[in-house]
Amino acid sequence: MKVDMASWLEEVTASVSRIGRRVQIMEVCGTHTVSFFRSGIRSILPPDLRLISGPGCPVCVTAQRHIDAAIELGSRPGLTIATYGDMLRVPGRRGSLESLRSAGADVRVVQSAMKALEWAGSHPTRQVVFLGVGFETTAPATAAAVLAAKRDAIKNFSVLMCHKLVVPAMTALLRGQRVALDGFLCPGHVSVIIGAKAYRPLVQRFSKPCVVAGFESSQLALGLLHLVRQIEGGAARLENVYSGVVHETGNRTARALMRRVFVVADAPWRAMGVIPRSGLELAHAYRAFDALERFGIALGEDHDPPACRCGEVIQGVATPEDCPLFGHGCTPRTPIGPCMVSGEGTCGAWYRFESALRSGGRQWAARSGKTDHLIAESGKVASIGEQGLREDSP
């Protein structure tokens, strides 16, 4: 397909105008949120097209009770916490994993569950707990590590299970009706595993258009175009504009691996409560690798920092700027809530991109007559290209 982003975005604008009301589309994935900012597309969309960030940042949706459990585990002598880097700075009741590490605890950043297992194998005198955080994208790798640990009889490795499933959370949002959504831009990475067909029940049950899209500027524009076309026509279909990467049935091998090691269970989400069948637990044959059971940790109650609105932000009920802490005490350097911590968090993205555009005087700048150009107050021209927002000399 020929890439003609300018025409696609002009058609998006025209379609929204014909719809004649505010159109609200949720981009579920945190990477989509960042990509819309980085590409510059977000800043040139019509005012009546609102992009709402959803619960697609794994760090942000991890329940506070699991953060507190990780910190409790990390405080124990002879125990090593292995975690993805984004989890280090998420605040808990007793500080963060980063502050725990500064106090002398052994908290290590790893790139994968298998790296954590390898470290455990080479340090048999230490108990190693891997924080199993993420959606269906990372869960297969955790499953593979657990299988390898059992096969190789590595007894000092365990997992704090925090893995989540995307579609049940989307279903919970629609059932809750706290925010009116016209459609979903479905996540690319997760869809590689679960397949495009996983979203079909949302279309059938709730009559909501769902479009699977990738992360390049052209994918974002095309995904929006397909969504607004459906909304204007009163249709609700599942479409996949990322078909070169995402297949209808997804990755069957990865899903079979998850079914072998995990069982689907009710799971707590930050601010969303316990969502039925939205998480993964270790199956009975692998329960010996469950860190909570191995170390006798009981999960506590969830809590949020006073005045923090992260829970509402991840549900699309509030924007970061609705939070009184945003930019006032809560910044990427001094995060109070998890949405400011993660590279995929909505608050972090708004702070880095939205606030920068406003301070530079370029947000909603006057149009030059073409959808792919903005004339900034600085006198420069900001162009939208496949590499994102760039400034050109006039």
Image (cartoon, rainbow, N blue to C red):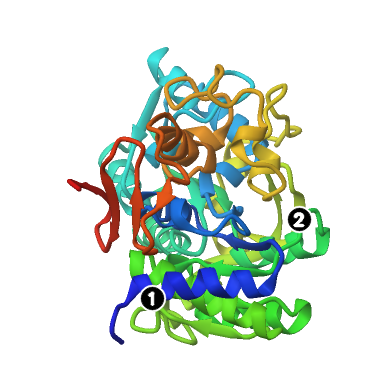
Question: Quick check: 229 above or below 388?
Answer: below
* Distance CA(mark 1)–CA(mark 2): 30 Å
**One can see residue 193 in this view:** no
Would residue 351 appear left or right of 153 to someone viewing this image?
A: right
Q: Amino acid at mark 2?
A: Val
In terms of secondary structure, where does tag 1 sit?
helix
What residue is pinned by disc 2? 179
In terms of depth relative to the viewer, which is nearer, 256 or 27? 27
In the picture, residue 205 is in which quadrant? Answer: bottom right
Q: What is the residue that sits farthest to the top in this orientation?
A: 103
Residue 7 is tagged as: 1
Q: Residues within 10 Å of mark 1 (few under 14, many from 20)?
A: some
Q: Residue at x 45, y 18 (%)?
A: 99
In the picture, residue 140 is in which quadrant? Answer: bottom left
Foreground mark, 1 or 2? 1
Q: Residue at x 57, y 49 (%)?
A: 162
Q: Residues within 10 Å of mark 2 (few under 14, many from 20)?
A: some
- Can you give x and y, in whole percent of width and height, for residue 372 in the image? 34, 62
- Can you give x and y, in whole percent of width and height, for residue 103 in the image? 42, 12
- Can you give x and y, in whole percent of width and height, for residue 269 in the image? 68, 48
Would residue 234 appear left or right of 224 to someone viewing this image?
A: right
Q: Earlier in the sequence, mark 1 or mark 2?
A: 1
- Can you give x and y, in whole percent of width and height, for residue 277 in the image? 71, 64
Quarter occupied by the N terminus: bottom left
